[in-house]
Amino acid sequence: MNYKLFGKTGLRVSELCLGTMTFGTEWGWGADKETSEKVFDCFANEGGNFIDTANRYTEGSSEKFVGEFIHSDRDHFVVATKYSLLDRKNDLNFVGNHRKNMIRSVEQSLKRLNVECIDILYLHAWDFTTPIEEVLRGMNDLVSTGKIMYAAISDTPAWVVSQANTIADLRGWTRFNGLQVEHSLIQRTVERDLLPMAHSFDIAITAWAPLAGGALTGKYLLKKEDATRLKETSERLNARNQLIVAEVIKIAEEINASAAQVALRWMMQKPQVIIPVVGATKLTQIQDSIGATKMQLSAEHVARLNEISKFELGFPHDFLQQQGVKDILFGGEEHKLSNHRL
Ligand SMILES: NC(=O)c1ccc[n+]([C@@H]2O[C@H](COP(=O)([O-])OP(=O)(O)OC[C@H]3O[C@@H](n4cnc5c(N)ncnc54)[C@H](OP(=O)(O)O)[C@@H]3O)[C@@H](O)[C@H]2O)c1
């Protein structure tokens, strides 16, 4: 396993992050404690130190299991958890991005994880109601009081994150060093604005559902027995996505790898550092996914995957890529600029 710097920090995290939304059976498709521990131990024994959980996952079981599994060597692991999603129904202040919920949620997570400090705290999803200054100031106070080490953000529009980090930098507050987004061969729309934004602010990208919840392992297309999490009507199994999965399977056969490894490797070989947050309900699944750290895709295979999964960038990106527009922006001399920016 290799390691990456976590955004604009000196923190070193493994190139794969272990997603633990499947730790606990409360949601109907997770793993029991014994299996979760086997998955965790396998990941840790292969050098994985980066663990992803959330207050909400499996109604708290995920954090509790993680707390137990890291206990004997707590400082070795980099534990990321999240706040924002509900801990109690029908109570407006037990959800949301605001300071009261942030502090309450963090206190509860510290207890469930049985740690004194959370390494990385993500805002889980943008609520479009809390002022960004309130979030930043809350995160800053949590860093100052030693409750968290680093701040990060997930499922939030690029303009909000860029506004936040600009304010944080100007005020000397803690900034977001991580951005978690859904990203896979069948979810590439984050390439429009979120990934370039993260690149320009030196924010680490962690990709959730890198296997599209199992779709990219090929098991739904090949109708394997253990494919149960996704319903037949899932968008992840639509006609476009089945073409992508078929190409992934084909390439996997050509290089004697698994489809999951090909799908993960595709994002690990991008020029921008992207850390897949892989989930598993079985030991064999995490063993398979870890195989992605020990292989390479050729340029031809990457090109085929990019082609089959291509998507419309939309305005203004498509417009700005037009030759006519480039001509009037560069006076027809664009080719002479050797250090052209993205
Ligand atoms: N920030 C957010 O909003 C957000 C949202 C969702 C998830 N997350 C994080 O991202 C993590 C990963 O999400 P995810 O579980 O949806 O991701 P995923 O890695 O795309 O899917 C994982 C699922 O795929 C199946 N699978 C995995 N490896 C396999 C293999 N080698 N062969 C066959 N099947 C395999 C398993 O499901 P089955 O065994 O049931 O088929 C497994 O639970 C979560 O644990 C969580 O930490 C974050």
Image (spheres, rainbow, N blue to C red):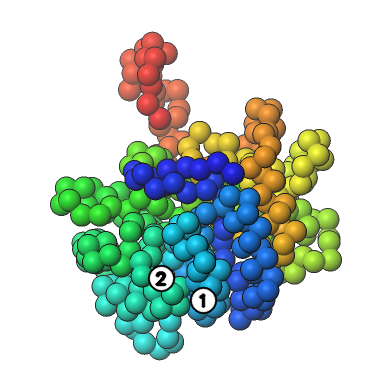
- Which residue is nearer to you in this view: 273 or 305? 273
Residue at the left extreme, as displayed:
171
Q: Is mark 1 within 8 Å of ligand 1?
A: no
- Which residue is nearer to you in this view: 71 or 256? 71
Q: Which residue is mark 1?
A: 64
Kind of element beneath mark 1: helix
Horizontal and vertical percent for residue 230? 69, 67
Res 132 visible? no
Horizontal and vertical percent for residue 22? 61, 69
How many residues crowd around disc 2 within 10 Å: few (fewer than 14), some, or many (20 or more)?
A: some
Quadrant position of residue 122: bottom left
Quarter of the displayed picture in which ligand 1 can be seen: bottom right
Q: Is residue 320 above or below residue 234?
A: above
Horizontal and vertical percent for residue 21? 57, 68
Viewport quadrant of the C terminus? top left
Q: Which residue is mark 2?
A: 115
| Residue under the image location 31 percent in, 73 percent down | 102
Circle 1: residue type: Lys
